[in-house]
Image (cartoon, rainbow, N blue to C red):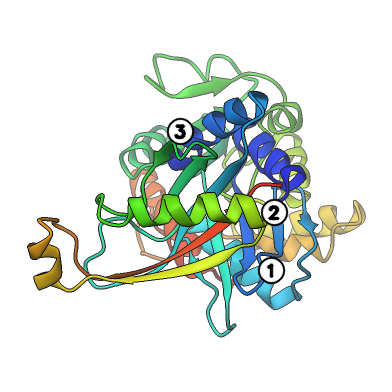
Amino acid sequence: MATDAEEIFPQIERWRAQGQRVALATVVQTWGSSPRAEGSHLAVNERGEFVGSVSGGCIEGAVVTEAVAAMEDGKTRTLEFGISDEQAWEVGLACGGQVRVFVEPLQ
Amino acid sequence: MKWTLFERLQRAIANNASAAVVTRLDDGVQAVFDGGGWEGDLSLDDAQKATALRMLIADKSGMLANVEGLFVRAYARPPRLIVIGAAHISQFLAPMAMLAGFEVIIIDPRRSFASAERFPGVTLMHSWPDEALAQLKIDATSAVVTLTHDPKLDDPALISALGSPAFYIGALGSKRTHAKRIARLAEAGLADQAARIHAPVGLDLGGRAPREIAVSILAQVIQVRYRGSAPA
């Protein structure tokens, strides 16, 4: 699955060229019916702009927040999201399953 | 990720080579495989490298089995089937492999064999096999099959392939032909590496017709891609 990278990596390079800090989030494990497979990437710059996806939109907000924090403290983190079907329904999202996301600053 | 590793990875992807990154999730320490070799601060043992490579060949990202906290990200390009020899079998193998999702390249310096009429829609290269293979940069998601029956063409291709990370190398020819081939490769100092060659090529399906041999070759390539295997 080089496609994700072909889309996202050039954007990372553009941000770097503009002097933006960048972090990369990656789905490393999934359980149940998570919308994006292991390896899916989301790249974030220091302004919180992002490309790619790690879910169908349910967790991107939280991942972006953590990604910006990772750029600031220079530390990696592993995030876990478990979204029950009922919860997903309540917030109006079509996501289910559980997903573990690794967030790393580029440095 | 360190920028130096990112650059290495980006270079491999830009060069159309399959690459992989292994990350220790505890602390983010990483190793990159860029087709040539492994780089980075994370040291992996041979078994871990082999498993990560198998995941790359099958284009499967995920946690490394039996090891706590190591994640493998496969950046695999579509698998390539590189065929040496625009033979009759190749005329069946090329379209079948394309339908199965392979990028197919046929190498044969004999232009009357490797013609667009005989191979519609297939990438054809008319240079000598070793030159063509050097140009193609065989990577970990490439399979190389020699079908010319002519050592002048097959041997240089096999020598190039044996020096590459190709996941599959196969050579047409009987057991007797292959024994002679092994002897020639041993003289070239490749006695150990030659064990990577699948020969006689293909799964033993029983069919003898060119189209049936093509099926058996493609089946074996797919089997090795997902299951891995030491040649019989």
For discs 3 and 2, the disc positioned in front in the rendered view: 3
From what the image shows, is residue B101 above or below residue B232? above
The chain letter for the residue carrying disc 1 is: B
Horizontal side, residue B170 vs residue B161: left or right: left
Give the labeled residue for mark 3.
A7
Q: Residue at x 40, y 20 (%)?
A: B118
- Tell me the number on the disc at residue B9: none
Residue B107, can we see it? no
Query: Residue B190 lies in what quarter of the image?
Result: bottom right
Q: Amino acid at mark 1?
A: Lys
Residue denoted by label 1: B49
A85, B100: nearer the viewer:
A85
Could you tell me if the residues under marks 2 and 1 are in contact, i.e. CB atoms within 8 Å?
yes
* Residue B186 place in picture, x, y as percent: 87, 59
Question: Which amino acid is tagged 3?
Answer: Glu
Question: Which is more foreground, mark 3 or mark 1?
Answer: 3
Image coords of residue B10 (percent x, y): 64, 37
Instruction: Assign a secondary structure to mark 2.
Output: strand
Q: Residue at x 62, y 32 (%)?
A: A20
Local secondary structure at mark 1:
helix
Give the labeled residue for mark 2.
B33
Q: Residues within 10 Å of mark 1 (few under 14, many from 20)?
A: some
Disc nearer the start of the sequence (2/1): 2
User: What is the distance, in whole Å, between disc 2 and disc 1 at their CAs?
Assistant: 9 Å
Q: Is residue B167 above or below residue B5?
A: below
